[in-house]
Amino acid sequence: MISLASMCGRYAITTPIEAMREIFDAVGGPEFQPRYNHAPTLMAPVVKTVPIFDKGERTGHRRVIDLARWGLVPSWAKSVDIGNHTINARSDTVREKPSYRGAFRHHRCLVPADGFYEWTTATAEKGGGRKQPVWIAPDQLAGFAEPLFAFAGLFDIWHSLDGTELHSYTIVTTDASPSLANYHHRMPVILDRAGWETWMTGTPAEAAALMRPHDGPFRVHPVSTAVNNVRNDGPRLIEKVDNPDAPPPKPKPVQGSLF
């Protein structure tokens, strides 16, 4: 089971694939299920680069959008179960940890997100008895340059014994910026457009220089604890709530489920 204390442990990605192609100047991108409550082990779009060849010689690269499973499974792993513990990669150890160091050198990507959730202990400290989820998103009205986040990510490709490929990814995290430190001590590495190409194709040293806190501006507000249950989805999850201490509504059964 993956703890909600993980940072980042839930995010939303609902931007249409056509818009993502334009924003990231990328091609490809199969249709995906938009989610307001995207969780580990589920598939989501990532942006990466692939080489271009002309008459057998590499002439450049282009950006592509692909679907990958959240929770990095290194190519050398014996089982996909390792992905349950690799949804985040700490910026201070990503270059040394065996699970990430190969991907950091060779397989860096962007992870598009409309926003992400964090759980603060403020409510619990006031006697509420539970951590309060908050929604954190780009504030374009206040000057955030893009309509969505581009998290720094790493990806890898794992092959099962029958030859099936699994594409997976992790999100790199760093210390929280001053504007978010009250909600959690860590945050995803958020890259500005000027850093996208360097993150994906630059040297490891150049990429490492980008792993720093981003101070927004962000929109932040409390949301319903319904987001705690991955079975809940929909735009209501990112709506501001006036009574954060209210108990969450019961999850709606998934259509077609026997449970």
Image (spheres, helix red, strand yellow):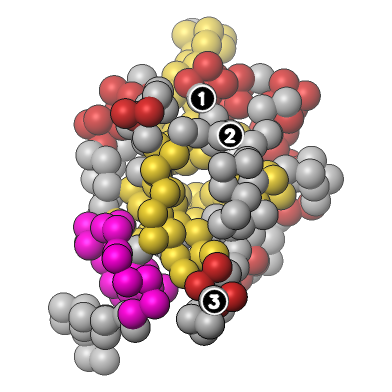
Quarter holding the N terminus is: bottom right
Query: Is 243 positioned to the left or the right of 4 in the image?
Result: left
**Distance CA(mark 3)–CA(mark 2):** 29 Å
Residue drawn at (51%, 25%) of the image: 192
Which segment is the magenta one?
224-246
**Distance CA(mark 1)–CA(mark 2):** 9 Å
- Which residue is label 2 attached to? 214
Identity, as a three-letter code, of the amino acid under mark 2: His
- In the displayed structure, 17 sits above or below 199; it is below
The front one of 40 and 83 is: 40
- Which residue is label 1 attached to? 192
Magenta-drawn stretch, dominant element (helix, strand or loop): loop
Q: Position of residue 93 (x, y in %)?
A: 80, 47
Q: Are marks 1 and 2 in contact (CB under 8 Å)?
A: yes
**Distance CA(mark 3)–CA(mark 1):** 36 Å
Residue drawn at (29%, 58%) of the image: 240
Quarter holding the C terminus is: bottom left
Query: Is 138 positioned to the left or the right of 208 in the image?
Result: left
Q: Is residue 231 magenta?
A: yes
Q: Name which of mark 3 and mark 2 comes first in the sequence.
A: 3
Identity, as a three-letter code, of the amino acid under mark 3: Lys
The front one of 28 and 181 is: 181
